[in-house]
Amino acid sequence: MRIHSTILALFVLLLISSNQLYSQGSPDYNGGLKIKFDEEGNKYLRLISWVQAQAVYNDNVPEDASHLNFNLRRARILAYAQINEKFLILTHIGLNNLNAENLSPFGKGDDSQVFLHGVWGQYNIGNHSIGGGLHYWNGISRLNNHSTLNFLTLDNNRQSWATFGLTDQFGRHIGFYGKGNFGKLQYRVAVNDVLKNGVDDRDPSEVDGAVYAGRRLLGSGDSGFAYAGYFDFNFLDQESNLLPFKVGTYLGTRKVFNVGAGFFYHPSGSVVFNSDGMLSGEDVAIFAIDAFYDAPIGENGAAVTAYATYQSNNYGKDYLFNVYGTGGMFYTHAGYLFQGDPNKARFQPFISFASNSYDAVSDNRNIFGIGANAFFSGHNSKLTLEYKNQKFGDAENSSVTLQAMIYL
């Protein structure tokens, strides 16, 4: 079966589904699973649980491998609570990317394990808060703070999670943060310990360019801390910053236009093997600007979503490892929600494009995606279909993914 035929068939299936299925539960959702312990709602416990299951067809696989595979992309539980408006605690656990390749016979393998994604405590002072723990109050861009519950596209732009596994545990650092707003301007800043045993375990003497292993090779005295921040101005509706997770698309329920800028700075984060045969540290500095627009069109439920960002990545001299590299990144996506009754199925096509340049090589990594969401109860119950093509030098890969998501 050719991949292009697969794309056409799945798109037809999704279009038919969006016309025949009806929403389930959206009129009764009413804020989700929230337990109030006082009449004012200042004492409460909120629980969120979600599952994303995928069928993935890959074009470029070994001869003995199947083109079609199934994947449990995410299975998570998040809880947060407060006893009054001054204190909040959040706990987030789950697993990711569980499939036939990493399942274990008795559920004891590393990839089979549920692990701690985040836990932090927070003290609130008016419109400002300080907190600490294993947290997700990141810098750089909106996408580096993205929620996994309400993407416009199938998933986040991978390169936007710019420190993923290099200095953090699955996008979370241990440290302290401050966040809040001054009128229309929202901010989040953090000082964090960095991961010692990151995914970049290379030996600098065997690499042309930098290796992201400052804490491992130079010690925590020279390379122990990283600093991050993100600032966005809310020109229209004010977005919530109770939690750190940025929304991907509001489905026409809000009118939002934000412009933001952020950074990540890690002194001596990378290491190079210099001409004297000695290791020396190089600062890691990542900066981004971005803009996000999401608004209804007319009075019939149609809506448009658009986002664009440029990110400057300096991981050290000629750094290149997996998807990460010193250079620049441009990313954009846009979607259109067709008009319709919110209590019935809705259809939202989207498109995305990313181009990543690297100082170490002349080739760009270009990624093109096109797909559609079918909402049966908003983001609480939806199907997403996406075709993605990635080219980097002579390597090219295409895939088609159908994902079903439910969150409560």
Image: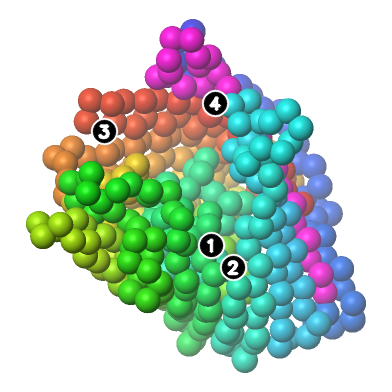
Which residue is labeled 3 in the image? 392
Secondary structure at badge 2 equals strand
Q: Which quadrant of the figure has residue 92?
A: bottom right
Amino acid carrying mark 1 in the image: Arg
Q: Earlier in the sequence, mark 2 or mark 1?
A: 2
Disc marking residue 206: none
Which residue is labeled 2 in the image? 134
Q: Nearer the viewer, mark 1 or mark 4?
A: 1
Q: Determine whether label 4 and label 3 are within 8 Å by CB.
A: no
- CA distance separating discs 2 and 3: 34 Å
Q: Earlier in the sequence, mark 4 or mark 2?
A: 4
Amino acid carrying mark 3 in the image: Phe
Is residue 180 found left or right of 17 in the rendered image? left
- CA distance separating discs 4 and 2: 32 Å
Q: Nearer the viewer, mark 2 or mark 3?
A: 2
Q: Main secondary structure of the magenta part?
A: strand
Q: Determine whether label 2 and label 1 are within 8 Å by CB.
A: yes
Residue 119 picture location, percent across and down: 66, 67
Q: Which quadrant of the figure has residue 118?
A: bottom right
Q: Determine whether label 2 and label 3 are within 8 Å by CB.
A: no
Q: Earlier in the sequence, mark 1 or mark 3?
A: 1
